[in-house]
């Protein structure tokens, strides 16, 4: 039977005892490094995700807005421009501003003037015809001259009769741009599908 040399077992236990704390320290060090790494990743990812959410928010807001139905019964694409009662009943056209919310991906400006239209109510009728005030030649604001019963453009002297037909000689290559208009029977509001067309051309092409 092998005898343990005096002092040898004692030094072995000593070495074991010295190694155990070392192993424990290494494990703690590893866990600490892992925790630091996870915290660092979280510090980078959380602001990035928050920033992305803020960056995308206007787009999401407009999407929500676009998908919502009009609250006042106005058909999609139409704007309430004036009361039928505000239009002269004698067939004389009157200009009205077109008010709408203006927005792009990042800005939202409620109730801005986006254009103007002439509304004309034929004598004795509750129907309305509508022309944009933009001259088809180059986009100047056309006025109406009640004395001659003509629309006139101050920029290059295009003129149009009361039905919007171009009168020669005029630089405009086409008649005034008519817009769809309908009267809401319940509210007597005139609803206009307001669009802009390209100017300076004979055909009518809608801007999108
Ligand atoms: S812009 Fe109207 S005639 Fe030129």
Image: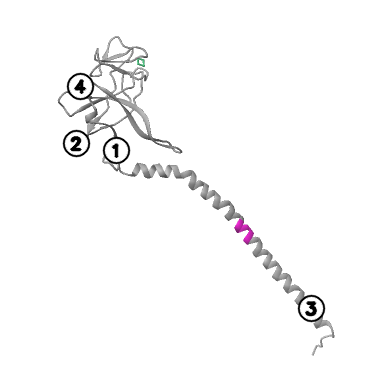
* Magenta stretch: helix, strand or loop mostly: helix
The C terminus lies in quadrant: top left
Residue hosting label 4: 91
- Between the C-alphas of marks 1 and 4, the distance is 28 Å
**Foreground pick, 54 / 148:** 148
If you read the primary sequence from the N terminus, does the residue marked by circle 2 or circle 4 appear first? 4
**Foreground pick, 154 / 83:** 83
The N terminus lies in quadrant: bottom right
User: Does the CB distance between marks 2 and 3 fall below 8 Å?
Assistant: no
If you read the primary sequence from the N terminus, does the residue marked by circle 2 or circle 3 appear first? 3
**Foreground pick, 93 / 181:** 93
| Mark 2: secondary structure | loop
If you read the primary sequence from the N terminus, does the residue marked by circle 1 or circle 3 appear first? 3
Q: Residue at x 22, y 37 (%)?
A: 187
Q: Residue at x 28, y 41 (%)?
A: 72
Q: Is residue 100 visible?
A: yes
Residue hosting label 1: 76
Residue hosting label 2: 185
Q: Is residue 144 above or below residue 179?
A: above
- Where is residue 78 shown, x and y percent of the image? 29, 34
Residue hosting label 3: 14
Q: Residues within 10 Å of mark 1 (few under 14, many from 20)?
A: few
């Amino acid at each position: 039977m092998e005898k343990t040399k005096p002092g040898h077992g004692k030094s072995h236990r000593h070495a074991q005892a010295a190694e155990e704390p070392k192993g424990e320290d290494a494990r703690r060090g590893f866990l600490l490094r892992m925790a630091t790494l996870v915290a660092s990743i979280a510090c980078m990812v959380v602001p990035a995700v928050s920033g992305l959410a803020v960056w995308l928010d206007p787009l999401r807001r407009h999407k929500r807005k676009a998908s919502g139905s009009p609250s006042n019964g106005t058909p999609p694409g139409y704007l309430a421009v004036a009361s039928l009662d505000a239009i002269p009943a004698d067939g004389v056209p009157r200009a009205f501003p077109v008010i709408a919310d203006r927005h792009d991906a990042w800005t939202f400006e409620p109730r801005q003037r986006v254009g103007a239209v002439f509304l004309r109510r034929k004598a004795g009728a509750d129907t309305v015809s509508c022309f944009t005030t933009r001259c088809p030649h180059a986009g100047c604001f056309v006025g109406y001259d009640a004395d001659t019963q003509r629309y006139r453009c101050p920029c290059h002297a295009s003129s149009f009769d009361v039905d919007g037909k171009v009168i020669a000689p005029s630089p405009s290559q086409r008649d005034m741009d008519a817009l769809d208009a309908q009267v809401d029977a319940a509210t007597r509001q005139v609803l206009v599908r307001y669009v802009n067309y390209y100017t300076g051309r004979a055909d009518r092409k809608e801007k999108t």
